[in-house]
Amino acid sequence: MKKQLLMGVAALCAMGLSAGAWAADAATADEVVVKVKEAAAAVKASADATLSEFDKKDGKWAWKDTYVFALDCTAGTVKAHPSEKVKGIKVTELKDKATGQEFGSALCAAAKKEHGGWVEYMWTKPGTPEGSHHRKVAYILTVGNYQVAAGVYDDKLTAAELEAKSAK
């Protein structure tokens, strides 16, 4: 009986530690803003080289459970993305995984704001089964001819909290 109790306690501790480790691997909205601004500066300095780096799943611009991507809203295409399924598609083909609603146009509109903007949609989180959808909020801003973005998986942040982060 004591052995079963000890095994049960050990299992609970292990689950708690793994949940804590997973939480540490989740990007934050603050990190997304910083990374997008860094990426925008890199695009401004050398667009072609930086955009090709956005395509790498394990590159500098992919971290924790998210990544930087780029749109060309004038041409209406996804210019750079670590998923070959997404790279090169029309912006209007970006659709919420739960509702099917198009959100690419909203990304382009948000990028026009002075400090960039945020767009909410449901997306498949890396490392989760295909078909599992999670709330993602993406921060996007315009630099030159491109719109640079990254998102965070979070179901609690409000629009006002997100806007405050991008205005910093």
Image (spheres, grey):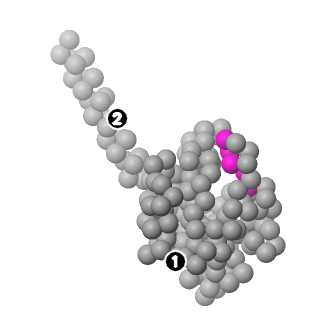
On the question of residue 5 being in view, the answer is yes
Q: Quadrant of residue 59?
A: bottom right
- Relative horizontal placement of residue 118, taking residue 49 as reference (left or right): left
Depth check: 157 or 87 in front?
A: 157
In this figure, which residue is indicated by the disc labeled 2?
15
Vertical side of 60 occupied by 126: above or below: above
Q: Residue at x 78, y 55 (%)?
A: 93
- In percent of width and height, residue 108 lies at 70, 68
Q: Amino acid at mark 2?
A: Met
Vertical side of 159 occupied by 4: above or below: above
- In percent of width and height, residue 155 lies at 49, 47
Label 1: element kind:
helix
On the question of residue 70 being in view, the answer is no
Classified by dominant secondary structure, the portion drawn in magenta counts as loop
Quadrant of the image for the C terminus?
bottom left
Q: CA distance from mark 2 to mark 1?
A: 35 Å
In this figure, which residue is indicated by the disc labeled 1?
38
Q: Over which residues does the magenta segment extend?
A: 94-98
- In percent of width and height, residue 51 lies at 67, 74
What count of labels does the image hold? 2
Q: Are marks 2 and 1 in contact (CB under 8 Å)?
A: no
Mark carried by residue 129: none
Query: Which residue is situated farthest in the front direction here?
Result: 160
Q: Residue at x 46, y 54 (%)?
A: 157
